[in-house]
Image (cartoon, rainbow, N blue to C red):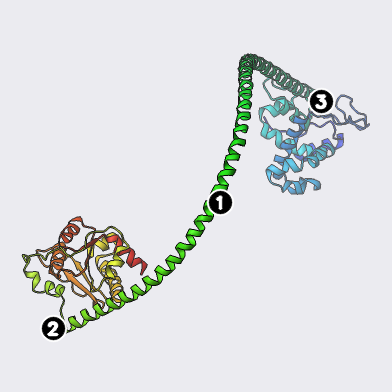
Amino acid sequence: MPLTEPYDDHLPQEDQVALDGALGNPDDNVVSDTSGASDPTTGDGPGVEPEPTLPEPVRQRIVTLTAAVLPTLPADEVPVPLRRVAKFAPNRRARLGAPAIAAQLAADPLFRQRVTARVLADAGDLGAAVVEGTAPAAADPVEVAALAYLARPRGWRELIDASGAAVRAEADSAVVAELVREAEQRATRAEHDRAVARVEADKLRDELARVREELGQLREESRQVARTLRETQARERKATELLATERGRAARASADVDAELRRARARLAEAEAAAGVARASAKEARSVDDARLWLLLETIGQAAVGLRRELALDPVDKLPADFVADAYAEQPGTAPASPATRARDTDDPARLDQLLALPRAHLVVDGYNVTKRGFGEMSLEQQRKRLITGLGGIAAQTGDEVTVVFDGAERMHGLPPAPRGVRVLFSRKGETADELIRRLVRAEPAGRPVVVVSSDREVADGVRRHGAYPLGADSLLRRLARS
């Protein structure tokens, strides 16, 4: 159906005719009255009826519909108070501009006519039904009342009153439903509280019976404690009498002890005097012994010098390990030396320092066994370099002979020069470092302290049989870390 400007009973008759003529859609129901008489049923003329009191949902819906239409109106058709509201965001327009919109709708019938035209266009069939003064039974009463307020057809106040009654009925129904629900909840809670109370009462009865039983037990225990207390008090009286007797005995014993202590002090003074005389005699005897020992050592030293001169022994350039590294390495079947004068195994890490303090000690290290245990995350070249550098520090501190043995079919090329006092050996093809270590130990003369560092049990057992001192790799790693 074509959209027409709705009839407004608050708009003066001449303005209504002018508006309809401007829109090009005259209303046949409007009757021109030049006498200025008013129609009491439509509210035209001087006796205009006041605005009805709208239910809050209807008022909010009217504001929402008007706020949605505001941006679609031409700027010159928007009243000045609402032009700033029209620029608001949609969600703020109805919320912040509600008072201004409601006031303008009530005071400006022309503005309401313009808004109504667009709202009815969007409402469709429902808007057409409201303009005709009827409301579909299935329609939302709030929507019908809002459209009736804007369009204001004949009987629009009755539509608003019916909508208000429906809204109030719905509100009353909601209130009644809420009251019924609360009553049901209170009844449910009361039933639950009664059940809980019954359970608590049963628990309290059981607790009362248990407390009575415990009270009976406590009374029996109280009687037993009272009887025990009387017996204890009797024993205490006896003990007090015995204590007085023992105190007398202790006093007599203390007097005897004091007398004995005085006699012991006198004997101690005599013993200290005798000890002073004995110390003086011992000091003189020690001086004589020291003189004899010095003379003996001097005699031995001169005898060793004379023996070296008589045998014409010159200082040597090579040590036994050097021969093993060269010619002796080609004779693996050489008979081992007697281990009778060699030391035995010890697991004490501090023992390494004690052994290296012995004169002319020889330290033999199983290279890869130590490096892989201490810093295996490095490459083999870095492992060798770090171990050899650490052993150079030990050789410089102790002045001992140090030999480190690595597995290798042939000597590694490009190695940095070994520190002073450190010998670096590689096992030859067909030979392991363990075999080379055992032959180094066998090549040493009987009586020389040889220390072998390796955590390999076969190496330790082999060198122990030849009289060397086997130590674990951890002892050397701790010694290097300390350096």
| Percent position of residue 232, x then y | 61, 26
Distance from Cα at disc 3 to Cα at disc 1 = 127 Å
Image: 192 above or below 475: above
Residue at the disc numbered 2: 313
Residue at the disc numbered 1: 258
| Percent position of residue 263, x then y | 51, 55
Of residue 92 and residue 338, the one placed in the foreground of this image is 338
Crowd class of label 3 (few under 14; some 14 to 19; many from 20; radius 10 Å):
some
Residue 443 tag number: none
Task: Specify which label sits upstream in the sequence, 3 or 1.
Answer: 3
Residue at x-position 32% and y-position 76%: 288
Callout 2: helix, strand or loop? loop
Task: Specify which label sits upstream in the sequence, 1 or 2.
Answer: 1
Q: Please give left or right for residue 140 compared with residue 350 in the image.
A: right
Examine the image and state in which quarter residue 94 appears. Answer: top right
Task: Residue type at mark 1: give it.
Answer: Asp
Callout 3: helix, strand or loop? helix
Of residue 229 and residue 288, the one placed in the foreground of this image is 288
Q: Please give left or right for residue 402 compared with residue 337 in the image.
A: right
Task: Residue type at mark 3: give it.
Answer: Arg
Crowd class of label 2 (few under 14; some 14 to 19; many from 20; radius 10 Å):
few
Task: Residue type at mark 2: give it.
Answer: Leu
Crowd class of label 1 (few under 14; some 14 to 19; many from 20; radius 10 Å):
few
